[in-house]
Image (cartoon, rainbow, N blue to C red):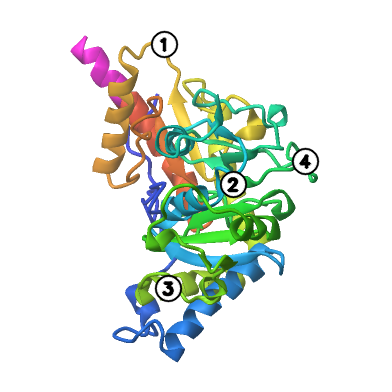
Amino acid sequence: MVTTHPATRPANPRFSSGPCAKLPNWTLDALKDAPLGRSHRAAVGKAKLKAAIDRTRAILGVPEDYRIGIVPASDTGAYEMAMWTMLGQRPVEMVAWESFGAGWVTDAVKQLKLDARVHEAAYGEIVDMAALDYDRDVCFTWNGTTSGVRMPDGSAIPADRGGLTLCDATSAAFAMDLPWEKLDVTTFSWQKVLGGEAAHGMLILSPRAVERLESYTPAWPLPKIFRLTKGGKLNEGIFRGETINTPSMLCVEDYLVALDWAESLGGLPALIERSDANYGEIAAFVEEHDWIDFLAADPATRSTTSVCLKFTDDRITDGAAFAKAVAKRLEAEGVGLDMGAYRDAPAGLRIWCGSTVETADVAALMPWVEWAFHAELEEQAKAA
C-alpha cells in the first residue's frame, strides 16, 4: 500500500485529452512570427496557410492527388462539412463505439434523415468493421477519444468499395499510421496530437470524395461555411489555403511551430514512437497492479493516445464517485490535470498519451495514481 507521496512529480501535469499538452518547452515567444493585424489574404497570410497544408501532407504522407483544406469549427466542423455535403447519394453505414461517433449517428438519423444502418458497440469494445457493407457510405472514428478504443488497422476496408469512407481521425492523426488508400474523407483538429489551438479543422479528400462533390448535390440547403464547390466544381482555393472564413493567424503560427517540432524529431515515425512509449508506461503499470485495467478489453484495439482506465477493486462501493475523487486528488496535488473519464463514458481515468507528452511525465504520474487510489480507498473505509 502506498501511504506517502511519491518522490517524483511530472514536470508537466497536463494530461487532458483535448485541448492537449503543448509541445515540450513551448512558450508564447514561439509565436512571435505570427502576422497579427494582417489580412489572411495578404501574401504572408496565404503563404502561412499554404505552408500548413503542404507540411501536413509531407509529415503525414498524404498522397499528392488528395486535397487538404483548413476549414472552420475544429474537427467537428470538418466532419459535419463532409457529412452534409457528400452523404445522401447512397445508403450509409453509421458506426459508433464512443460519444463522438454517436454524435455523427445523430446527425445522420435525426438531422439529415438518411437511409442509415447503425452499428454500435459498448464503451471498451469495437464494431466488426469487416461486417459492414462498403457499397454504402461508411462513417466512423479511427480512434475513440472517449472510449480508448481504436481501429487496429484498415484491413477490413476493401480497396474496391463502392461507397465513400468518412473517417474522424482527430485523436489519431500524427500518432497512428493511417492507410490513406482506405480513407476517402479524413478529418482532424490541431488541438489533439500536436497540442495546437482550437477552432480550426483539417479536411482531407481522396479523388473519389472530390468526384462525389462534383457529381452530387444534396437535397438540403448548405450554409456558406459548408460549401466546397462553385458551379458544380470543387473550390480549389480552399485546398490552397484560401479559407472559407477568417482563420486565426496566431493559431496557424502555432500549428506551424508544432510542425517544425515534428520535423525536428524525425516526422511521423518519431511522433508515433513517442505516443507508443507513453502508452507503454501505462501498460506496464496496469500489468503490475490488479486494481486497475484498460477500458478497452482487446489489446489490439487499445488507443495509444486517449488511454482510458477503470478501477476494478471489489472494495469500491461507488465506482463513479471513487473515480471522480481519485481524479480530484491528482488535480489537487498538481500532478495530473483533467484526467477524469469523459462525461458519457464509464467511470475511470483518461490519460492523454499523445506525442507532445513526455514519457518521463507519464512514468512519474503512475505512482501518483497508485497513491491516490489507496488514499481514496482509506477515505472510503473511514466513511463506512
Tell me the amino acid under the disc marked 3: Val
Q: Residue 209 at what x, y percent from top left?
A: 64, 55
Quick check: 28 above or below 21? Answer: below
**Which residue is pictured at 80% across the width and 44% down the height?**
160
Q: Looking at the image, is mark 1 or mark 2 earlier in the sequence? A: 2
Mark 1 vs 3: CB contact within 8 A: no
Q: Secondary structure at mark 3?
A: helix
**Which residue is pictured at 57% across the width and 73% down the height?**
236
Q: Residue 103 at what x, y percent from top left?
A: 42, 37
Q: Magenta segment range?
A: 376-384
Quick check: 159 above or below 204? Answer: above
* Label 1 crowd bin: few (<14), some (14–19), many (20+), radius 10 Å: few
Q: Residue 63 at what x, y percent from top left?
A: 71, 65
Which residue in the structure is indicated by mark 1? 314
Q: CA distance from mark 2 to mark 4?
A: 14 Å
Q: Looking at the image, is mark 2 or mark 4 earlier in the sequence? A: 4
Which residue in the structure is indicated by mark 3? 252
Mark 1 vs 2: CB contact within 8 A: no
Say left or right for 46 vs 334: right
Q: Which mark is residue 166?
A: 2
Q: Secondary structure at mark 2?
A: strand
Which residue in the structure is indicated by mark 4? 158
